[in-house]
Amino acid sequence: SFISIQAFPALLDLPQDLEVTGVSCGSRHTAVVTRGGELYTWGWGKYGQLGHGDNASSDQARRVEHLVAEGLRAEEVVCGPWTTYVHVLE
């Protein structure tokens, strides 16, 4: 599938009730942490760096459901070139 990888800022629609408290950008992906402790990711996902349990890419922000299922609260996110590191609280 085609993924629009842009080298410049672009507007992104997130659900209206989300308050973003942290953001990080990798080489080809982006992640945000919300005030509610959720993690949303989008971009190129070839190496699983989006955290959705697959290697799919996405132009739309998607919540990382694994953290929700495990009862984990995202506190901070740092994206590397092809990786994503998340500091979580139980």
Image (cartoon, rainbow, N blue to C red):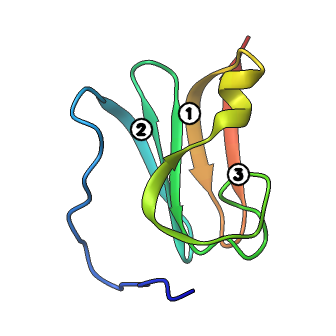
- Name the disc covering residue 76, or none: 1
> Going from the N terminus, do you reach mark 1 or mark 3 first?
3
Q: CA distance from mark 1 to mark 3?
A: 17 Å
Where residue 85 sits: x, y (%)? 70, 46
Q: Tell me where residue 80 sits by quadrant.
A: bottom right
Which mark is in front, 1 or 3?
3
Residue picked out by circle 3: 52
Q: Secondary structure at mark 2?
A: strand
- Give me the residue at 50% from left, 89% from top: 2
In this picture, residue 20 sits left or right of residue 87: left
- Give me the residue at 35% from left, 85% from top: 7
Q: Which quarter of the image is occupied by the C terminus?
A: top right
Q: CA distance from mark 2 to mark 3?
A: 19 Å
> Going from the N terminus, do you reach mark 1 or mark 2 first?
2
Q: Nearer the viewer, residue 68 or 78?
A: 68
Q: Residue furthest front?
A: 1
Residue picked out by circle 2: 22
Neighbour tally class for label 3: few under 14, some 14-19, many 20 plus, Cα within 10 Å: some
- Name the disc covering residue 68, or none: none
Q: Nearer the viewer, residue 80 or 67?
A: 67
Q: CA distance from mark 1 to mark 2?
A: 6 Å
Q: Disc 1, disc 2: CB below 8 Å?
A: yes
Where residue 24 sits: x, y (%)? 48, 53
Q: Which quarter of the image is occupied by the N terminus?
A: bottom right
Q: Residue furthest top?
A: 90
Q: Amino acid at mark 2?
A: Gly
Q: Amino acid at mark 3?
A: His
Asked if residue 55 is positioned above or below residue 34 in the image, the reply reads: below
Neighbour tally class for label 1: few under 14, some 14-19, many 20 plus, Cα within 10 Å: many
Which mark is in front, 2 or 3?
3
Q: Amino acid at mark 1?
A: Glu
